[in-house]
Amino acid sequence: MSQEWNLPRHATVCGTCGHEFEIGASFRVFLSLIDGAFRRDDVCDACAEPGHGGVVGWWRTRRKAPPEKRTHAFDREAIYAFFSRLDDEAQIDKRQFRFVLALLLWRKKVLKLVEATNAEAGEIWKYVAIHDGKSYAVVRPEMDEQQMESLSEQLESLLAGSDATDGEAAPVSETSRA
Ligand SMILES: [Zn+2]
């Protein structure tokens, strides 16, 4: 299993040009799924989105002042806001991403799993968001338990300490916002 997502979790420089982000500066985080592994790229506004393909989503964040105490808090609100904007896409990598993200939010007690039903499209997992009661239907993509577990762990560590700002997170595909 390749574990090639060895970028720092709390980026201080642009992964493309090496420019250092000032405290408070805004930059973009691209999340890609490549050969079954998630990859995170932090990119300044002057640089183009990563050219390696496989981007499943992105959001905008800011470099925070270094915390007095080192924390790796999972930003429930921001990650949930990001999830809530993802549509169910036919594309397999985006489907895997949405499914794994939902699992993670379930584990973090942001979502509650209501039921899993079989539909024509496949297995549908129904979730309700605990704080606002919104419901989500997530199609379970073709993937085995091991793959799911591996993606879930990667995603969790990539999102630890992430501070996506509400309002600007968006799926990378424009067509998904019909
Ligand atoms: Zn750059």
Image (cartoon, rainbow, N blue to C red):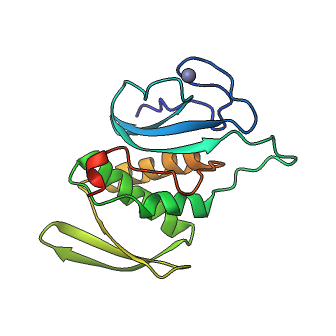
Residue 97 in percent (x, y) is at 37, 51
The answer to whether 172 is drawn above or below residue 12 in the figure is below
Along the horizontal axis of the image, is 170 left or right of 93? Answer: right
Instruction: Give percent across and percent down for residue 133.
Output: 47, 82
Toward the viewer: 114 or 164? 164
Which residue is painted at 42% across and 48% down in the image?
Answer: 151
- Displayed quadrant of residue 32: top left
Which residue is the extreme one toward the right?
68
The image quadrant that residue 109 belongs to is bottom right
Residue at point 64% right, 20% down? 19
Q: Residue at x 66, y 48 (%)?
A: 161
**Where in the figure is residue 112, as x and y percent of width and height?**
47, 77
Number of numbered tags placed on the structure image = 0
Above or below, comparing residue 120 to residue 66 in the picture:
below
Q: Quadrant of the C terminus?
A: bottom left
Left or right of 55? Residue 12 is right
Q: Position of residue 80 (x, y in %)?
A: 51, 63
> What is the residue that sits farthest to the top in this orientation?
17
Vertical relation: 87 (above or below) 44:
below
Q: Residue at left 46%, top 52%? A: 152
Tell me if 178 is positioned left or right of 39 in this view: left
Displayed-image quarter of ligand 1 = top right
Query: Is residue 42 or residue 69 the one in the foreground?
Result: 42
**Which quadrant, please, contains the N terminus?**
top left
Q: Nearer the viewer, residue 57 or 40?
A: 57
Tell me where residue 65 sits by quadrant: top right
Question: Among all residues in the image, which is located at the extreme left?
Answer: 120
